[in-house]
Structure formats: C-alpha cells, structure tokens
Image: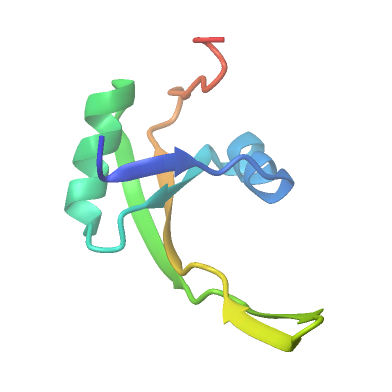
Amino acid sequence: MEILKKPLLTEKVAQLTEKLNRYAFKVDHRANKIQIKGAVEAMYGVTVKAVNTMKYVGKLKTRNTKAGAVSGRAATYKKAVITLKDGEVIDFYSGI
C-alpha cells in the first residue's frame, strides 16, 4: 500500500509493543490519521484504537572528501504510532 511504507522495528518500539500494545510505521508524509487507520485495519485485520503522528526533519550530514567538506541532509519522514484494541496483535514475522 502506498500509505504505509514500512514498519519500524527498533528497541524503543519493541518496548512500546510489549507494554502498551503500540506499533510504529513510516508512512507517506501526505497521509492523515484517518487514512493511516484505514490502511492498518485493511492490511493487518486489526482494530485501531488511536493514531499518533510525528514529522521528523532529516539530520544534517557532513563528510570530508578530497574536494572539501560535502554537506547534505538525510531524508525527512513521517512516523505513525498505532495503538491497537486490547488482545489484538500484529505479527510482522509470520510471512518469513
């Protein structure tokens, strides 16, 4: 789907999943909360209780080369944290 780009699988998100039944995804920067909720429910067959979104500005990166210092910026992205109804889970590893 074009709304959900990929799930975020980090230690911080794993703790949120275990304690609060929350999952994180990188999403399209134009998607709103209603579209994100519909995409998660359609793709994984779960009931979404809440959606929280955040926009991240890419970090400024600098590296030294023979021609001098080259600076640029990492890509910006939007992150959505999904809270599921109690008792429901998303298994990312079932298709492996």
**Residue 31's quadrant in the figure?**
bottom left
Chosen colour scheme: rainbow
Residue 76 rendering spot, x and y as whole percentages: 46, 69
Q: Nearer the viewer, residue 77 or 75?
A: 75
Q: Nearer the viewer, residue 28 or 90?
A: 28
How many numbered marks appear?
A: 0
Q: Is residue 72 above or below residue 19?
A: below
Residue 85 rendering spot, x and y as whole percentages: 38, 33
The outermost residue toward the front is 67
Where the N terminus falls, by quadrant? top left
Query: Residue sitting at 69 percent across and 43 percent down?
Result: 15
Indicate left or right for 85 with 94 as reference.
Answer: left
Query: Residue sitting at 44 percent across and 64 percent down?
Result: 77
Query: Residue sitting at 21 percent across and 59 percent down?
Result: 32
Q: Is residue 8 above or below residue 87?
A: below
Q: Is residue 24 above or below residue 45?
A: below
The outermost residue toward the bottom is 68
Residue 89 rendering spot, x and y as whole percentages: 47, 24
Indicate left or right for 77 with 51 as reference.
Answer: right
Where the C terminus falls, by quadrant? top right
Q: Is residue 84 above or below residue 26?
A: above
Query: Residue sitting at 49 percent across and 10 percent down?
Result: 95
Q: Nearer the viewer, residue 92 or 77?
A: 77
